[in-house]
Amino acid sequence: MNDTRPAIEFRHVSYRLDGKESRELLHDLNLEVQSGETLVLLGRSGSGKTTTLKLINHLLKPSDGELLVDARPIREWDVIRLRRMIGYVIQEVGLFPHFTVARNIGLVPKIENWHANRIAERTHELLQLVGLDPEIASRYPRELSGGQRQRVGVARALAADPPILLMDEPFGALDPITRAELQREFFQLQKRLRKTVVFVTHDLREALLLGTRIALMEAGRVVTLQTPDQFLASKEPLPCAYKDAFGTGLQV
Amino acid sequence: MNLWQFILQNHTEVLELTLEHLWLVGISTLLAVLIGIPLGILITRWPALNKPVLGGANIIQTIPSLALFGFLLPAPWIGARADRLAILALALYALLPLIRNTYVGIQSVDPAVVEAGRGMGLTDRQLLFQVELPLAFGVIIAGVRVATVISVGLATIAAAIGAGGLGEYIFRGLAMVNNQVILAGAIPAAAMALLADLSLGWLEKRLSPH
C-alpha cells in the first residue's frame, strides 16, 4: 500500500439501479479513505452506506465516476485479486455451513495455495487474535453462538492478511453485551493491525468508538465528514438530529 | 397356480425382465442427470433461459407416455431399437425434477453465504463447486429420487413398444386376464421403486450439509 496516497478514493461516483424508474442510490460521491484509518459510514437504512461499501469490492459497479483502490482505477483491477486483498465482514456473517471453522478461515489461503501447515498455524493464530479458543477450529458454524460466529467471520476476513477491511454492520445482530464486547475488542485489534477499515453502522455510539472519521450519509450523499470530536461539537442539523436520537452520555 | 409358484417356475425370466427394467431406468436416469443438472446450473447463471428451459421440461412432462413413445418412433437411430427409444423417453421425463431441483437447490442457498463467498474473491467456478453445489446437494438428490421413482413406474409402459422390462408381464397378464401374471410384473417393479426411494432417501439424508 502506498502510504502517501489514499487507500480508497471515490471520484464523482454515482450508482443507479437500472429499470423502468431508475433510482439513484448514490449521488456524486467524493470520498478518500486514508491508509490505516477507520472510516465509519453512518446513516439510516437506505442512505447508501452498504452500496458505497459494495462498490469498493466491486460487488456493485459504479454507474458514473471513478473509484480507485491503492491508487489504481477499479476497472484496471482483476476483480478476484482485488477482492482477495479486501476482507469482507457482513452482519449475517455468511459462514459456510458445510465447512468447519478451520476450513471457513482457511478457504482463501487454501485457494491461494498456501501450504497446509501454514494454513493451520494461521488459523490458530487468528482464532486467538479474535479471542476464541483454538479448540473450536473443528466445530461447524451451527454449533457456535452468535458472538462466536461473528468472531470467526472477522478471523476469516483477516485470513490472508488483507490491507483493507470492509465491515457492514458486523455487530448489528448481536445482543447488547456481546456487541459491546466485540466493539471493544475490535477497537484494540485495529490499534494493533492498522488496517484500512471502512465500517458501516447506524449506531452513533459505535461510530464514535471505532471511527477515526465519520461520514454521515443521507439519501445517497455524504452530508458531513468529521472526526468524532468534530461530530460531537457539530451544530449542523443532521449530526444534531443523530445526537438527539442517541440521547445523553455520548463521548469519544 | 399362485404368484409365488409362478415366480419360482419362471425365475430366470423374472430375473431377466427385472434386469432389463433396471437397465432402462438406470441408463435413462443417468442420462437425465448428465443433462438435467448442468441445465439446472445453467439457468441459475442465465436467468433469461429459466422460463424456456423449465417450460420445455414441463411440456415434455405433460405428453402422455404412450404418445411420447409414438412420437419418437420415426426418429433416426433412436427409433431403430425399442430400448433406445424407451431410454430417451424415460430420460426426457426425468429431466424436469432434475432441472428444477438443481435450480431450486442453488437458488435457496443462503444469499449471505453466497455474498460472503463472492466478497472473499471466490471465482464463479469455486463458488459453484465449493459452496453452492455442496449446499444444494440434498435438494438435487431429492430430484434424482423423484425422477428414479417416476422412471421405474413409467418404464413398465416401455413394454408396449417392445423394449422389455417388467411391463412385459403386466401387458401379458392384461391380455390373458391373469392377475397372477400382472402381479409378477407389478410387484418387482413396486419393490424396485421402493428400494430406490429408500436408498436415495438415505443418501439424501447423509449428504445434506445441515
Image (spheres, rainbow, N blue to C red):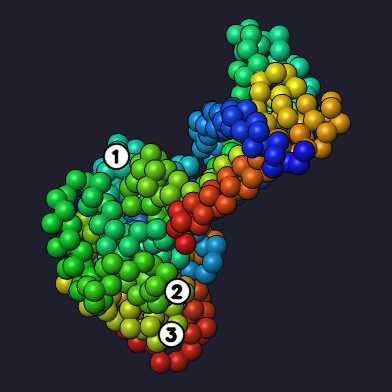
Residue with the mark numbered 1: A77
| Tag 2–tag 1 contact (CB < 8 Å) | no
Q: Distance between the residues labelled 3 and 1?
A: 39 Å
User: Residue B6 appears in which quarter of the rendering?
Assistant: top right
| Tag 3–tag 2 contact (CB < 8 Å) | no
Disc 2 is attached to a residue of which chain? Answer: A
Where residue A242 appears, x then y in whole percent? Answer: 49, 79
Where residue B129 appears, x then y in whole percent? Answer: 39, 43
Please indicate whether residue B123 sits to the left or right of residue B150 in the image: left
Q: Mark 1 or mark 2, which is nearer the start of the sequence?
A: 1
Which quadrant of the figure contains the N terminus of chain B?
A: top right
Residue with the mark numbered 2: A172
Q: Is mark 1 on a helix, strand or loop?
A: loop
Q: Residue at x 45, y 46 (%)?
A: B133
Return the residue found at the far bottom.
A249
Where residue B16 appears, x then y in whole percent? Answer: 59, 28
Q: Residues within 10 Å of mark 3 (few under 14, many from 20)?
A: few
Q: How far apart are marks 3 and 2 (CA)?
A: 9 Å
Disc 1 is attached to a residue of which chain? Answer: A
Where residue B203 appears, x then y in whole percent? Answer: 49, 51
Q: How far apart are marks 2 and 1 (CA)?
A: 31 Å
Residue with the mark numbered 3: A176
